[in-house]
Image (spheres, rainbow, N blue to C red):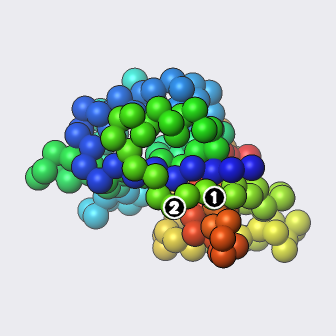
């Protein structure tokens, strides 16, 4: 399956909120947010589209992800703009974002779902199914998962460069 990676280096606050509210981009059901701040513990939550502006305002770094795409941002209140990255397997969405000023990164990516692998919360015991489970090492402290997640694993895709075969991105796509 092909994947598309697009970047907008200086998206305005309002336009970032519109991207996060776009029904063609972020699924209404089963969307999640993973947000961070230099002064607060990261938060993992069910994504609330109605509170997009509050999420971006309160969390200068974040990810919103669902089955169809992941949107990542780093927002700067001083410049009132964000560096935004979108990863998706939907060619139509990728084309529409190009019209919004997003630029493709690379030419083509292969989106590979690594079987039953999933990222488990930091500090969790590796589940018994074992070898395909990767502990989440990018966030060096516990995350508080929403209550409905239980013993959650975060699903993901690898985005592999077609010319070299190297994995360049990991796209979050859901929680099981």
The residue shown at (57%, 64%) is: 169
Neighbour class for label 2 at 10 Å: few (<14), some, many (≥20)? few
Is 109 left or right of 132, judged from the image as shown? left
**Viewer-proximal residue among 72 and 90:** 90
Name the residue carrying label 2.
106
The residue shown at (36%, 35%) is: 100
Specify the label residue 74 is tagged with.
none
Q: Is residue 63 visible?
A: no
Q: Residue 54, percent across and down?
A: 29, 35
Q: How many marks?
A: 2
Q: Mark 2–mark 1 contact, CB under 8 Å?
A: yes
Q: Which residue lies most toward the right here?
A: 129
Relative to 132, say whether 173 is above or below: above
Q: Is residue 9 visible?
A: yes
Q: Residue 91, percent across and down?
A: 60, 38
Q: Quadrant of residue 149?
A: top right
Specify the label residue 109 is tagged with.
1
SS at mark 1?
A: strand
Is 26 left or right of 165, judged from the image as shown? left
Relative to 126, say whether 29 is above or below: above
The residue shown at (61%, 57%) is: 108
> Distance from label 2 to label 1 (Cα)?
8 Å
Neighbour class for label 1 at 10 Å: few (<14), some, many (≥20)? many
């Amino acid at each position: 399956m092909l994947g598309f990676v697009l970047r907008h280096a200086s998206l305005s606050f309002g336009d970032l909120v519109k991207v996060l509210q776009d029904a063609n981009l972020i699924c209404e059901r089963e969307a999640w947010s993973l947000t961070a701040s230099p002064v607060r513990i990261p938060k993992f939550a069910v994504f609330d589209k109605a509170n997009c502006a509050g999420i971006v305002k309160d969390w200068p770094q974040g990810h919103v992800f669902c089955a169809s795409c992941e949107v990542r941002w780093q927002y700067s209140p001083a410049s009132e703009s964000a560096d935004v990255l979108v990863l998706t397997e939907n060619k139509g969405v990728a084309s529409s974002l190009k019209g919004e000023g997003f630029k493709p990164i690379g030419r083509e990516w292969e989106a590979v779902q690594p079987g039953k692998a999933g990222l488990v919360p930091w500090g969790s015991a590796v589940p018994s199914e074992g070898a395909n489970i990767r502990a989440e090492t990018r966030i060096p402290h516990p995350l508080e998962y929403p209550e409905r997640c239980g013993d959650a694993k975060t699903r993901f895709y690898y985005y592999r460069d077609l010319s070299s075969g190297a994995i360049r991105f990991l796209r979050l796509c859901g929680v099981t």
